[in-house]
């Protein structure tokens, strides 16, 4: 044939009506097993593929959830997407992925979201790590449910959102160090244009004040390179070296370990170190890294579950997931307290 095989071609090959073929393709239970087998054999022989676009236009259901990724500091994005895809599959949906990176205007994000709606997606999850992205969505009016992931809070009550409690995670890290006896705890931040970095600063500052501690704040960008650079800056004045460092994430903590090794600063004998994320391999650094674990798979799956509930008629909802402190060998009591 000079065209792709259609449903009528399958019907002729199998010796059935096109309605029967439609029932087989859509999983309808009222087809006899032997008839179903004959239709499936014809589909296999002809290489028939159903027209998903036409089906979506007719039924107004595409069985697809759109996912928009925006932001450049999403180091654990594969784990978020793993949770998204697993939850979507469980609920009977496919995932259509779109990416908007860099510092382009918020209009690009709106256009990306609208393009997905033009493809008849039934719902949209937006993975957003900075305020500009959420601001762009705040006034957006769509006829499909939207959930914002890693949101930092969304003013629009029609949007669902799910995030890990970043401030609590930072407080857990600082409280652990305070309980060990540290009073001078420096914080090497991630990129402060992001929600996560800002919330971790708030948690560090609040827990430090509550525990009677002090410490300098140096701004980085979530990269190992920035952790390396900032750790060298801390070492410039050994008399003012903090007894503990709370790094903006595990990538930065890796850079800190490398810089301290160059400077002859021992971890945790001279300076204790805590990271954030519990990235894969954090337990195999030298020393094994104490860090705050975020369940990124759960984060992604929770976003899809919120959307599925919205599709089922529930109202928009907000969830804040609880992080967990994982204590390893990179933290100990300061030498003065031993």
Image (cartoon, rainbow, N blue to C red):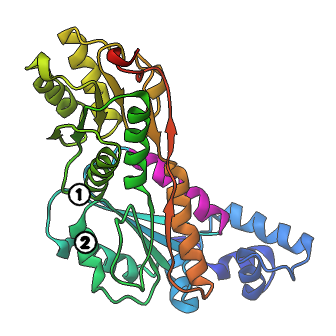
Q: Is residue 223 left or right of residue 286?
A: left
Mark 2 near mark 1, Cβ–Cβ under 8 Å?
no
User: Which residue, given by chain and number where applicable, does mark 1 sit on?
Assistant: 101
The quadrant in which residue 132 appears is: bottom left
The residue located at (13%, 16%) in the rendering is 238
Q: Position of residue 121 (x, y in %)?
A: 47, 78
- Which residues make up the magenta segment? 76-91
279 magenta-colored? no
Please, is residue 104 above or below residue 210 in the view? Answer: below
- In the displayed image of the protein, which residue is found farthest to the top? 264
Q: Is residue 268 left or right of residue 261?
A: right
Total label count? 2
Label 2 environment density (alpha carbons within 10 Å; few <14, some 14–19, many ≥20): many
Which is more toward the observer, 245 or 101? 245
Q: What type of secondary structure mainly makes up the magenta span?
A: helix
The residue located at (37%, 46%) in the rendering is 170
The residue located at (44%, 74%) in the rendering is 124
Q: Secondary structure at mark 1?
A: loop
Please, is residue 188 above or below residue 58 in the view? Answer: above
Q: Position of residue 141 (x, y in %)?
A: 34, 89
Label 1 environment density (alpha carbons within 10 Å; few <14, some 14–19, many ≥20): few
- The quadrant of the rendering that contains the C terminus is top left
- The quadrant of the rendering that contains the N terminus is bottom right
Q: Position of residue 235 (x, y in %)?
A: 14, 20
Please, is residue 218 above or below residue 261 in the view? Answer: below
User: Which residue, given by chain and number where applicable, does mark 2 sit on?
Assistant: 109
Real-space Cα distance between discs 2 and 1?
9 Å
Q: Position of residue 146 (x, y in %)?
A: 43, 78
């Amino acid at each position: 044939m000079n065209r792709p095989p259609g449903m009528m071609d399958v019907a002729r090959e199998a010796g059935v009506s096109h309605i029967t073929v439609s029932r087989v393709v859509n999983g309808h239970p009222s087809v006899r097993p032997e008839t179903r087998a004959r239709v499936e054999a014809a589909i296999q022989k002809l290489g028939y593929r159903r027209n998903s676009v036409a089906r979506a236009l007719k039924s107004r259901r595409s069985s697809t959830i759109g996912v928009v990724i925006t932001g450049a500091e999403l180091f654990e994005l594969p784990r978020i997407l793993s949770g998204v895809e697993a939850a979507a599959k469980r609920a009977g949906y496919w995932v259509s992925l779109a990416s908007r990176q860099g510092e382009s205007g918020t209009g690009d994000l709106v256009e990306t979201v609208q393009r997905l709606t033009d493809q008849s997606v039934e719902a949209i999850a937006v993975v957003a790590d900075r305020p500009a992205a959420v601001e762009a969505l705040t006034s957006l009016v769509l006829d499909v449910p939207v959930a914002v992931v890693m949101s930092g809070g969304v003013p629009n009550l029609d949007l669902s959102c799910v995030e890990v409690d970043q401030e609590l995670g930072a407080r857990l890290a600082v409280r652990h160090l305070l309980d060990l006896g540290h009073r001078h705890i420096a914080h090497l931040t991630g990129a402060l244009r992001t929600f996560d970095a800002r919330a971790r600063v708030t948690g560090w500052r609040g827990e430090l004040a509550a525990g009677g501690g002090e410490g300098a704040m140096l701004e980085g960008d979530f990269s190992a390179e920035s952790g390396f650079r900032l750790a060298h800056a801390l070492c410039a004045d050994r008399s003012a070296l903090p007894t503990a460092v709370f790094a903006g994430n595990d990538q930065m903590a890796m850079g800190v370990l490398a810089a301290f090794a160059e400077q002859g600063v021992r971890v945790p004998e001279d300076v204790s170190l805590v990271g954030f994320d519990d990235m894969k391999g954090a337990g195999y650094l030298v020393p094994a890294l104490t860090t705050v674990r975020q369940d990124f798979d759960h984060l992604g799956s929770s976003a899809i579950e919120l959307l599925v509930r919205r599709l089922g008629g529930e109202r928009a909802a907000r969830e804040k997931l609880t992080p967990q402190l994982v204590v390893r060998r990179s933290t100990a009591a300061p030498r003065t307290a031993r």
